[in-house]
Amino acid sequence: MKSFVHSAAQAILFLLLLGVISSCGKSDDPQPQVTTSIAAGERFSLFVRNDTLWTTGNNGYGQLADGTYDYYDTPKRVMTGVKSIAAGRYHTLILKNDNTLWAVGRNNYGQLGDGTTTTVNTPKQITTNVKAMAAGYYHTLILKNDNTLWAAGYNGYGQLGDGTGDDVSTLKQVMTNVQSVAAGRYFTLILKNDNTLWATGDNGNGQLGDGTTEYVSTPKQITTNVKAIAAGHYHTLILKGDNTLWAAGYNGYGQLGDGTTTNVSTPKQITTDVKALAAGQNHTMILKNDNTLWAAGYNGNGELGDGTTEYVSTPKQITTDVKLVAAGRYHSLIVKNDNTFWATGFNGDGQLGQGSQGASYLTSYAKIILSATIPAPSSSSNDL
């Protein structure tokens, strides 16, 4: 009997010690590692982790949403209750958990959709019942829960798809039965519920993929069996239902990934086994089904993250274990499967979040630290 009691006591002591050891091994980081969205603007970066928006980089028009016009080079917490974000040239779109859309930043063409052309540095509620959005250079696309597409901002090339060339400062409905959208510099890609791809706007480099270089102001059907899209400044990426990647548009730096630098006006197949993609100004990021990241195109600032500044015209494997990717004008962002953030490319305004603006670029991905020492958002931000 004594032996049994002694053994039982030893087992209990072991379990208690195991619990102490386990608790000691736990991270004291107050922020759970849950990442839902990343976006890269002209020279700024946005991250959503644990429903909190972090921003870094250029803030000349208030696009970092912190109520100032001050640049910063370390990510700062600015808003809570956030589901996803989109970044234009100098404006930011924020989708909250309650499906309200908020906008901040430059508004010279009415791209914030608030009925004015006044720039704001504190997020302003624009509309409700939103499920997705996209931001171009100076235009905004909003997808509502009823699958209607709304647009605002600069429309000089017909990128709003309303059949005119007139700018719009209040969101205007332009299409129904839409499942996702992407915004290039001055053009728009629209994926409908039947998986057909439609496009409108600037087409000077064949980026609409319709076999011409003529711009259109009313959405035109391009192809079928599409499940995802991405738009660079002048090029288009199309992910088909069979996981093949197709591309069209400007190819001066090899960003289409077809091994040439020749523009393409009809979508051309590039590679297979793709699950996600992102397009920067002149570079392309490809996430494969095995979670490897591949890249092609302009690399003068190290935005491809391959450790060089040499252009690439055929997709090159960069890293592994990636789950999210975003591409800005001259920089790229990724999130690894362990939910860590990484960045590469031009850092002149602190957009890489490395704590300095001195280095002009990074040629390989460097980890971004979201410091727990940064104060939580103010009560006014929490109320947004």
Image (cartoon, rainbow, N blue to C red):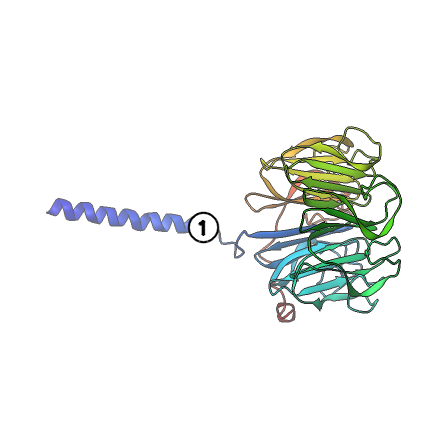
Q: Position of residue 208 (x, y in %)?
A: 81, 44
Please tell me whether residue 365 is drawn above or below residue 122 in the rendered image: above
Is residue 134 visible to us here?
yes
- From the image, which quarter does the C terminus lie in? bottom right
Q: Give the class, few, some or many, for how many residues have Cα within 10 Å of label 1's Cα (few <14, many ≥20).
A: few
Is residue 147 shown left or right of residue 151? left
**Residue 110, image x, y percentages:** 82, 64
Q: Quadrant of residue 226?
A: top right
Quarter of the rendering containing residue 77: bottom right
Q: Is residue 374 visible?
A: no
Residue 93 vs residue 266: left or right?
left
Left or right of 266 in this view: 148: left
- 322 or 159: nearer the eye? 159
Is the residue 268 above or below the residue 353 in the image? above
Q: Residue at x 25, y 50 (%)?
A: 12
Q: Amino acid at mark 1?
A: Lys
Residue 333 image position (x, y, % from top left): 68, 45
Numbered marks: total:
1
**Does residue 64 lie above or below 40 as drawn?**
below
Residue at horizontal 68 percent and vertical 38 percent from the top: 286
Q: Position of residue 270 (x, y in %)?
A: 72, 32
The image shows residue 283, relative to residue 69, as above or below, that is above
Asked whether 278 or 72 is in front, the reply is: 278
Task: Find the residue positioned furthest to the left.
Answer: 1
Of residues 234 and 208, the one drawn nearer to the viewer in this rendering: 208
**Relative to 31, 7 lies left or right:** left
* Residue depicted at x 86% and y 50%: 216
Residue under label 1: 26
**Foreground residue, 283 or 69?**
283
